[in-house]
Amino acid sequence: MSEIEEVQERMKADMEAMKEQMATTMEAMMSMKKIMEVNATTVAATNIVAEVDPSPPSSLNQINHSTSDMVGQEGKELGSTGDPHFVQV
């Protein structure tokens, strides 16, 4: 095989390797595009829900409850602190 033919063979092999790399890169980019589309849809849906119901999530709701009289062992009344407590609902 002449030197020119060897160079041509290496070039063909290099081109095939580049084609495979490009195909892999394109697949990765398409996957990323799908993920971005799903995320955009999720954000849009969340924004719509927030516009419809602007109340904070239930984990953030705090209601002011005063404490009732506390009863200890054997039914003895311990009294009331009278102070309000924040209770997460």
Image (spheres, grey):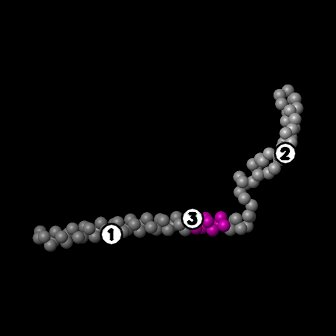
Whole-Å distance between the Cαs marked 1 and 2?
Answer: 71 Å
Provide residue 13's location: percent of width, then percent of height.
25, 67
Quarter of the rendering containing residue 80: top right
Mark 3 Cα-neighbour bin, 10 Å: few <14, some 14–19, many ≥20: few
Indicate the secondary structure of the residue bearing disc 2.
strand
Please tell me which residue is depicted at 43% across the width and 65% down the height of the picture: 28
Does the magenta segment cover residue 41? yes
Is 6 located above or below residue 65 in the figure?
A: below
Residue shown at 57%/65% (left/top)? 39
Tag 2 residue = 66
Q: Quadrant of residue 73?
A: top right
Three-letter amino acid code at the position of disc 2? Ser
Residue 52 or 80: which is nearer the viewer?
80
The kind of residue on which mark 3 rests is: Asn
Which of the labelled discs sits on residue 39, or is there none?
3
Q: Which residues are magenta?
A: 38-47
Report the mark closest to the observer, 1 or 2: 2
The residue under label 1 is 19
Q: Residue at x 73, y 67 (%)?
A: 52
Residue situated in front as seen by the camera: 5 or 75: 75
Q: Where is residue 47? Give x, y as percent.
A: 66, 67
Q: Quadrant of the N terminus?
A: bottom left
